Amino acid sequence: MLKSDLPHRWPAALDEAIAQTHGRFTQCIVLSETDSTQDAARRMRLTPGTIVTALRQVRGRGRLGRAWTDTAGHGIALTCCLPRTLAELATLAAPVAIARTLADFTNYAVGIKWPNDVLIQGRKIAGVLIECTDDRADLGIGINISQTDWPPELADRAISLHQLGATTATRLAVLTRLLPFLADCFKCFPHAIAAEFAARDVLTGTIATFLNHGETVTGRVESIDPARGLAVKTATGRRWLPALTTTVVPPSSAAGG
Ligand code: BTN
């Protein structure tokens, strides 16, 4: 482990980062190990404004109940508790804040694949999961920092900052950059964040298939709106797909393969 990532440095460094979030976040709890920071946040009944991160997350999850690989000291896992009213904005703000952060550590272009993937060189480097209850939204973020050995099924789909040559990037350095960016993105005008998202989005302008509440929608991706979601031009007109309830159907599945 790089010296600047040593666990005892995390609490003070994160307190300093929290102080740069202008009140959006008030506390960051550091766990040595947890199953999923999403579940930890619920168990601890964290209130909006609080963040929980773990030096190791062993049973993280992604969207659609997919597993998120054990961070095993190599990846960042955090959950930010937000008021429910920020859930829709979080779908745009979180990927944009992650992209801004990663751009500080690598010269490779950082892309976003609506709704929740952050990509570099076509591979996933970070993911976002937003789980809502009536009064809160748990924004989960996973970022790959120093992984080099991936399980076979992820070997050609995932990538870490170290694999891109940013071998001095530490989890703590990335995390402390991320928190102020995240707070900034929540303060921006939603249309400005949507425009920044769209500028990085790899789906805009392409033809893609989506699943929303059991319905399949295929069309050309036109734009992103902070309130309505993704605008898709279909054979029967424009459809709006909300980020919280829509998934992208991979091209092979869309083609029936
Ligand atoms: C996805 O790509 O489908 C979303 C991945 C989200 C992973 C993060 S890691 C921190 C938080 N805790 C979890 O169990 N999941 C999210």
Image (cartoon, rainbow, N blue to C red):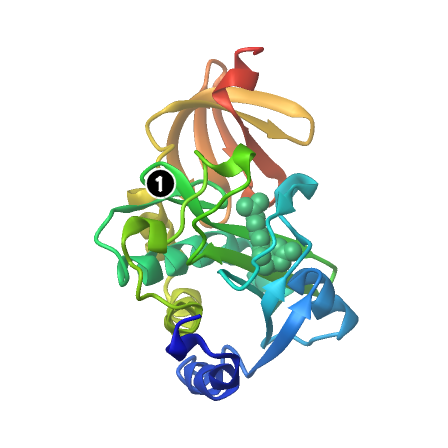
Residue situated in front as seen by the camera: 229 or 124: 124
Which residue does the image show at 48% across and 20% down from the upper left? 251
Residue lying at 60% horizontally and 65% vertically, measured from the top left: 56
Is label 1 within 8 A of ligand 1 (CB to nearest ligand atom)? no
Q: Residues within 10 Å of mark 1 (few under 14, many from 20)?
A: many
Residue 183 higher or lower than 195, as above or below? below
How far across and down, in percent of the image, does residue 202 sit?
35, 35
- Quadrant position of the N terminus in the picture: bottom left
Kind of element beneath mark 1: loop
Residue 33 versus residue 143 in the image, above or below: below
Indicate left or right for 136 with 30 as reference.
Answer: right
In the image, residue 105 lies at what x, y percent?
A: 28, 61
Residue drawn 52% across and 85% down? 8
Residue 39, position in %: x, y?
Answer: 73, 62
Instruction: Give percent across and percent down for residue 26.
Output: 55, 83
**Residue 80 shows in this picture:** no
Up-down: is 29 above or below 110?
Answer: below
Quarter of the image that includes the C terminus: top right
* Residue at figure coordinates x 53%, y 58% from the top left: 141
State which quadrant residue 80 falls in.
bottom right
Q: Does 220 sit left or right of 240 as displayed?
A: left
Which residue appears farthest toward the top when viewing the image?
A: 256
Could you say which is closer to the camera, residue 212 or residue 172? 172
To which residue does mark 1 refer?
201
Check disc 1 and give the amino acid type: Asp
Check the image and name the residue furthest to the left: 107
Q: How many marks?
A: 1
Q: Is residue 22 visible?
A: yes
- Residue closer to the observer: 3 or 143: 3
